[in-house]
Amino acid sequence: MSYVTSTAVSAGDYGFDLQFLVLDEDNNPVDLTGASITVVFEKRGSTSASIAKTGTVTDATNGKFKVTVASGDFSEVGAVYDVKARIQYANERITAKGVVIIVEE
């Protein structure tokens, strides 16, 4: 399972949404109906620097959700974050990964 698309963000910017689309191995949207989503941004080269956020489903049947960037989330120019979405259903948990966030000037 993966997201569509990787993106770059400007260091220090906040108050905008990062939009995600979860696809299965056949490139079909994953139905997010009834799911709760935790998104973890893991900073490369660091064992402890990560950001966890709650995802908001925006179009469940088409596999879309978003997270809002807060002040201080992406402040270091050149930092690279691997993104993992932990999608929890009543009886199942799946992890979607594949997006990379690059912090630019």
Image: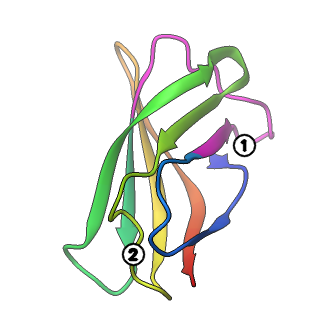
Direction from residue 11 to residue 59 in the image, left or right: right
Q: Residue furthest right?
A: 27
Identity, as a three-letter code, of the amino acid under mark 2: Ser
In the figure, residue 93 lies in which quadrant? Answer: top left
* Mark 2 surroundings: few (<14), some (14-19) or many (≥20) residues within 10 A: some
Place of residue 94 in the rendered image (x, y in percent of width and height, measured from the top left): 45, 36
The quarter of the rendered structure image containing the C terminus is bottom right
Q: Residue at x 25, y 72 (%)?
A: 49
- Relative to 14, does residue 91 appear above or below in the rendering? above
Q: Please tell me which of labels 1 and 2 falls first in the chain.
A: 1
Place of residue 27 in the rendered image (x, y in percent of width and height, measured from the top left): 80, 40
The quarter of the rendered structure image containing the N terminus is top right
Which residue matches tag 1?
25
Residue 27: say if magenta.
yes
Asked if the residues shown at circle 1 and circle 2 are in contact, with their CB atoms under 8 angstroms apart, the answer is no
Q: Which residues are magenta?
A: 18-37
Place of residue 62 in the rendered image (x, y in percent of width and height, measured from the top left): 73, 22
Which residue matches tag 2?
75
Q: Residue at x 62, y 17 (%)?
A: 60
